[in-house]
Image (cartoon, coloured by chain):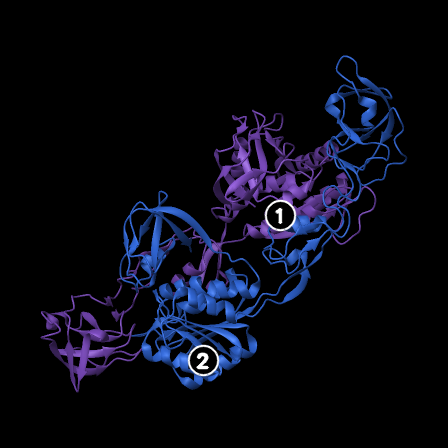
Chain colours: A purple, B blue
Amino acid sequence: MSLFLRVVTLEEAVGVIHDIAPAPAGEEIPLSKALHRVLARDVPAAEDIPGFARTTVDGYAVRAADTVGAGEAIPAILRLSGEVSMGMEPGRPLGRGEGIYLPTGAMLPAGSDAAVMIEYTERIGDEILVKRPAAPGENVILTGEDFPKGGLILRRGTSLSPRDIGILAAAGHDRIAVYRRPVVGTISTGNELVPVKATPGPGEVRDANGLMCAAFVEEAGCRPRPYGIVRDDRKALGGTLDMAISECDAILISGGSSKDIRDLAASVIAEKGEVLVHGIGIAPGKPTIIGRAGGRPVIGLPGHPASAYVILHALAGPLLSAMSGSRGVEKRVSVILAENIPSQKGRVEFVRVRIEDGRAFPCFGKSGLLNTFAGSDGLVQVPAEREGFEAGETVEVILW
Amino acid sequence: MSLFLRVVTLEEAVGVIHDIAPAPAGEEIPLSKALHRVLARDVPAAEDIPGFARTTVDGYAVRAADTVGAGEAIPAILRLSGEVSMGMEPGRPLGRGEGIYLPTGAMLPAGSDAAVMIEYTERIGDEILVKRPAAPGENVILTGEDFPKGGLILRRGTSLSPRDIGILAAAGHDRIAVYRRPVVGTISTGNELVPVKATPGPGEVRDANGLMCAAFVEEAGCRPRPYGIVRDDRKALGGTLDMAISECDAILISGGSSKDIRDLAASVIAEKGEVLVHGIGIAPGKPTIIGRAGGRPVIGLPGHPASAYVILHALAGPLLSAMSGSRGVEKRVSVILAENIPSQKGRVEFVRVRIEDGRAFPCFGKSGLLNTFAGSDGLVQVPAEREGFEAGETVEVILW
């Protein structure tokens, strides 16, 4: 159902985004390529980990029962039965009254149930003096004690950190099921746009949104596919949109700061699908478009980079998170506001702030400027039902 | 000077790391590849931005003087002199008593100094009724108002966000000077190690550190170069280290949980350079080695992945940050401690914690387990001069 005819709230717009986001698909990749990818399935242990009982200290494997009552004055005396090397299997089970030397991580012989640190022993010929009692299980990890076979190692939806990669490696998962990274097309529209490396003529500006949107897509863990600059022309935009529909999972169209051009984008999207939202009660970014073209979600972003970036955070972020199965990468911090932020009731306002000495200073000034954008650290979101925030209040800052 | 003969403090160890980290080198790359790269130079505006005066609203460019006193009842009446399209230069200067239509972002004609939003005007034939006065500069951005030519846009050392990419694109920097990403070799040592995809035999374990260290290097913005598993053998380790010295900017050697092996690694490093630190007053990770081989910084990490990860954070992180010119990527949060953390005075202790409902719960248990590592969210660092933290204290958590 189209909400096209009225200005919707930010919550409604995010709801539409979740409705149209296709469910993430899975793929199997090598673990060596999996940093920051998102697990598509719970990962259980395929076997007991560790696969054998091992020590956690350099010292002697013993039967705990043989060390009961041992002390500095009256040590327990054990027969040295040899040594276990790293990566080797002990030759024979440990007999009563015996001890065997092993380095940290080495395999315990059958019969032993504890290890004594070398610091608490003394070796005299073939005898080991043990000067502390060892409790059963002390300084050893038993077979399957870390992860028993079938036990959950990591949950679906985990974005893999280096730590997670290490744990999956230890458990033998050299290939892993992760969500596919959606391909997201980026189209910049506007007769005033020239490529970044061009020198703009009078009235022209460089296409900042193309690279910015692509970088945002990349940071969100998706694959950007840039379609460059398209003139404000129904046929040109329609042709590029058709190409993007056939090659991408979602499409971001930026530009159209003037009403005519926004209407052109909306009408081209409608031609190939439907416009669901055209106008959101937020500032900046009111004229944002949400729709579907050829079955793909499409967001129409404002033309000015600083406004476009707000919509990337507020709407493209939730879309890309849903499509890639991730929990999002937005970083937020709670900070005390240093100055009042006035805001108009009835719409959500995103105000740029600079964080200095742990306090947030609003960056006021003309909305079309990049310098306040460059000088800011993030956004404060003023809810629609409030007329702003007062100095001294704690606010949440969405960090760039 | 070698600190080899005594156990050094964590601060001393970090000091050694900074002493041996080579200064970062620069390179020029396309802006489209620059996400999360670090600027090697301050970036000034090469020209005035914007390059021409433009409007920030859909409406009419006017001379502010012509609108003085205008109101709903008695509007100012201007002659419509035409229209400026996006990307076009206005045909002629704006005369007195004239107004010209322009969409948001279009170029102001000479003579005009403000813009009136279309909402506050009415058009009757060739006349524009202006129902609000416009102050000079209102709704327009003047030439160079955003960034004057030569003005600083972004500082050296900035790790480029999508926002920064957009700003650099707007300023025409399609290539950009960033710090080169250092190549960091990773070597895993230990006779007990088998590759991740192998099934370990009795006494054997999979090499978790190789992939974990490589992922850590990648997350830190450097380029990992894996050298796989090397047997505990002087010649084998020496040969691999030589190869890594010739191909890498720094080297991480993991493994050697037993004393013999640690000593072997230290002696091979000493053969090709010097061991500067062998033993740090921290837990876990006391037997960590810091040295130089063939002029490259080398860190010898503990064998157990959970201990190795602490040293990656505590020492490899500062090394890689210094070498890549970045400010580091470590994320920290302040959280209230839910339970006491006891700790031994005289050494820094890193304790794993789980964060739940905004409170930090220490993950106690055997140090050699991966499950408490997998179930934790980060580390609390207990300073050497303290005997732990008490429940209710606010602690800083270094997030994984």
The amino acid at mark 2 is Ile
Please state if A49 lies on the left or on the right of B319 as rendered: left
Which tag is nearer the camera, tag 1 or tag 2? 2
Report the disc number at residue B163.
Answer: 1
Q: Are marks 1 and 2 on the same chain?
A: yes
> Which of B343/A222 is in front?
B343
Residue A247 visible from this viewpoint? no
Please rate how many residues cluster around mark 1, counting C-alpha atoms within 10 Å: few if below 14, some from 14 to 19, many from 20.
many
> Which of B312/A171 is in front?
B312
What residue lies at 67% left-to-right and 36% top-to-bottom? A367
Give residue B175's quadrant in the image: bottom right
Please state if B122 lies on the left or on the right of B249 as rendered: right
What residue lies at 76% left-to-right and 19% top-to-bottom? B131
Name the subunit of mark 1.
B
Q: Secondary structure at mark 2?
A: helix
Name the subunit of mark 2.
B
For the N terminus of chain A, the quadrant is top right
